Image (spheres, rainbow, N blue to C red):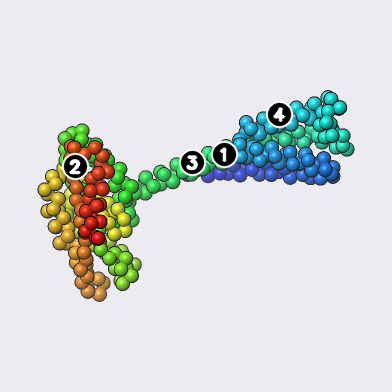
């Protein structure tokens, strides 16, 4: 994060210098009519090339302009000599050429820094998504973490001839519950679900909140025939929820399960299998 801010400040500093160069050149060329306007346009053109195409392109254009202007002074008969057949003093033209070079450099560096800044921003966002993988209410990992852990467990089971099972369940009418009872009761419900799920799973099991109304558990070293035992215990304990006014609400969940199989080639098949069961029950 600190590196990102440092690069942002550095980029702003370079951009400020670039603006100062353009502004100073504008003030210097303003009294010289059409020729001053032409030189100012060339300066902006080089700056635009640097900002959009980078330092090498802007320096290339600058060298071409240097060649044309130098040739104009050396060969006064060339058509390009119109540039020097003006009242612009030679030392101002030298200053303009220096500003042109600085514009090419600073605009190109600004473009490079902007690219780096965006890359670092994307990297930082990806790191945040990886680190902040825990749902703040339930304490369960999120959907991205689920696929990571599912792949890891699949690889371990393949390598060491182990097994694991996967259980997914979705609460019906979740949105209606929130509309009827409010956000406070929704949070209490999620705390209730997480407590009861923790109570009926082991420390080695991994729990996830896949979506706002969908949960999943990776049951490590658990044969498939034992999944339904875990499912029945959880369902029995979470199907009834007591509101703050002591009113009981009956909840309905749709379940899907799958497990590791040596014949499977992709860990995603386990997730898809369980999800299809859940969706089929919902429909």
Kindly check if marks 1 and 4 are in contact, taking CB atoms under 8 A apart as contact.
Answer: no
Q: Which mark is residue 63?
A: 4
Q: CA distance from mark 2 to mark 1?
A: 47 Å
Measuring from the top left, give residue 188's x and y in whole percent: 28, 65
Provide the secondary structure element on which disc 1 rests: helix
Measuring from the top left, give residue 179's x and y in whole percent: 33, 70
Q: Is residue 214 above or below residue 271?
A: below
* Residue 110 visible to an observer of this rendering: no
Q: Which mark is residue 215?
A: none
Left or right side of 227 for 36: right
Residue pointed to by mark 2: 260
Residue pointed to by mark 3: 120
Provide the secondary structure element on which disc 4 rests: helix
Within 10 Å of the Cα at label 1, are there few (<14), some (14-19), or many (20+) other Cα atoms? some
Of badges 2 and 1, the one in the foreground is 2
Q: Is residue 196 above or below residue 2?
A: below
Q: CA distance from mark 1 to mark 4?
A: 23 Å
Residue pointed to by mark 1: 113
């Amino acid at each position: 994060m600190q590196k990102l801010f440092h690069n942002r400040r550095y980029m702003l500093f370079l951009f400020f210098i670039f603006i100062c160069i353009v502004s100073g050149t504008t003030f210097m060329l303003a009294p010289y009519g059409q020729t001053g306007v032409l030189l100012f346009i060339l300066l902006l053109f080089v700056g635009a090339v640097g900002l959009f195409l980078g330092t090498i392109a802007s320096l290339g254009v600058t060298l071409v302009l240097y060649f044309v202007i130098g040739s104009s002074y050396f060969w006064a008969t060339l058509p390009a000599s119109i540039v020097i057949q003006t009242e612009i003093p030679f030392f101002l033209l030298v200053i303009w050429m220096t500003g042109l070079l600085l514009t090419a450099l600073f605009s190109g560096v600004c473009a490079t820094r902007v690219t780096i800044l965006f890359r670092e921003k994307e990297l930082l966002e990806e790191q945040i998504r990886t680190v902040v993988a825990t749902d703040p209410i339930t304490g369960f990992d999120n959907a991205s973490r689920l696929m990571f852990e599912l792949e890891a467990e699949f690889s371990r089971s393949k390598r060491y001839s182990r097994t694991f099972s996967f259980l997914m369940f979705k609460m019906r009418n979740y949105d209606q519950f929130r509309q009827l009872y409010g956000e406070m009761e929704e949070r209490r419900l999620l705390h209730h679900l997480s407590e009861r799920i923790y109570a009926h799973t082991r420390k080695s099991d991994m729990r996830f909140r896949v979506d706002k109304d969908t949960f999943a558990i990776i049951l490590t070293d658990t044969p498939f025939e034992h999944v339904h035992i875990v499912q029945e215990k959880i369902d029995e304990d979470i199907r009834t929820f007591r509101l703050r006014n002591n009113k009981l609400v009956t909840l309905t969940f749709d379940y899907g399960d799958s497990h590791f199989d040596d014949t499977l080639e992709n860990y995603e098949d386990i997730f898809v299998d369980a999800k299809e069961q859940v969706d089929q029950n919902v429909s």
